[in-house]
Amino acid sequence: MPASRRRFLTQSGSLVLGSTLLPAFGAELFAHNPLRFSALDKINVGVIGVNGMGWSNLTALLKVPNVQCIALCDVDANLLAKRAAELKSPVKTYSDYRKLLDNKDVHLVIIGTPDHWHCLMMTDACAAGKFVYVEKPCGNSVEECRLMEAAQQRYKSFVQVGQWQRSAPHFQDAIAFVHSGKLGNIRTVKSWAYMGWMKPVPILPDGTAPAGVDYKTWLGPATLRPFNGNRFHFNFRWFWDYAGGLMTDWGVHMMDYAFLGMKAGFPNTVMASGGKMAYPDDASETPDTLTAVFEYDKFNIVWEHATGIDLGPYGLTHGTAFIGNNGTLVLNRDGWYVKPEGKKMEEVALQKVQGDSLLLHHQNFIDCIRNNKPENIHTPIQEASKTAQICQLGNIAFRTRKKLAWNDGSSQFDAADANQLLKASYHNGYLLPKLG
């Protein structure tokens, strides 16, 4: 059944987006919020997808004063009942997200579903006049990411994407140091995720969905396949129908800071090599080992990931390193430090993480809503879309086994088979959003 398409007009206004770390966007992207919330007004939240990050986001958001959850939606009735009981406050439950969006008492929607649902749900939530917090990566294809940007512009919506590291003070401080120029000429940036905890995904036979799970709705626009436990809940990340593996799961976090530090747009070329080298016979589809190189005019950005290994570059499981002529800055979720190149600069000792970054991210979004300041959103859809798209380019280079040249003007590769992978593929009667 195709998803319904309701369109609402919103008032337009004049705002300019800008901060020390984010590029400025034109005033046409935003409008003043017609709903006004003082510091004492309750903001009512609805959550779509209450497992994993959907629940983590709600748990963090409820620590912000005068925010309450009034609605939950999930296709797993058992999980839905469990989460409703855990809230210990009155809450309406839904199996159809569109009915949650019809609830006019819901002001803000958290979208915590698998990636292949993000575009449809975010677009519908914007059309319904909701504030939207959508998990990363914002879309599951380049085409979807661009449609999500267009939806935000069409409905003048407040949208925050779950790349919460942008709200972490130590990450912001590290990027300010990179921008200071003290590292000298930066020719290489490395980002990585080495996931030692990840074990093989065992091969399971197809079967029937657990009682209480609406599997047809869970599939949504994805290819129709029999139910398989490997593809459900957390492990959906390792199948192309629903996600992009570690390249888009962790890559959008670590690469986001590489792009911020270098003020980088789309690359000139991209190439990637890897495969299922750790667990060649397991059930997953996406590569467990991958190196991708994004070439720019004056520097390269390199992505690496590997499962079953913890000792990544600089002995860290994850991070981003800016390698300059004068020194190298190494940054991850625990903090950042600088090692000098000889005596060309002063060493900077480890600057540790400060506070609860996920909570700060949600506090930022609520502050923007209460102050009617969308220009202060830390991860606007435009920035999250760019990061997700570039990570998708890395996956496309891997899947085509080609070094691909990117044309910024046409937003296309120099290879027809690669351009096909830029597109979204919708099935089961679902259609891409139409915003015209």
Image (tube, rainbow, N blue to C red):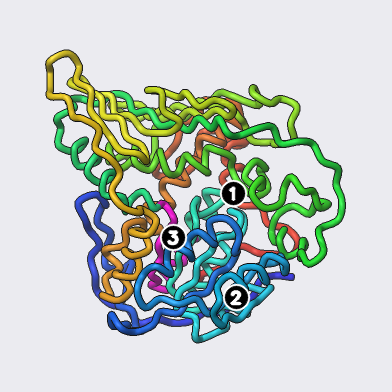
Q: Earlier in the sequence, mark 3 or mark 1?
A: 3
Identity, as a three-letter code, of the amino acid under mark 2 = Arg
Say left or right for 206 vs 124: right
Q: Answer whether residue 120 is magenta in the image.
A: no
- Identify which residue is drawn at 50% across, 67% down: 110
Check disc 2 and report the residue beneath it: 5
Q: Residue at x 62, y 45 (%)?
A: 237
The location of residue 169, given as percent across then percent down, is: 26, 49
Q: Give whichever of 47, 354 is nearer the camera.
A: 354
Depth check: 393 or 366 in front? 366
Residue at label 3?
149
At 24% from the left edge and 37% from the top edge, which residue is drawn?
351
Instruction: Give, as a single range, the part of the protein colored magenta.
Output: 148-163
* Local crowd size for mark 3, using a 10 Å CA cut-off: few (<14), some (14–19), many (≥20): many
- Image position, residue 65 (x, y; %): 34, 74
Say few, some or many: other residues with alpha carbon within 10 Å of mark 2 (under 14 / 14 to 19 / 20 or more).
Answer: some
Secondary structure state at the residue bearing disc 1: loop
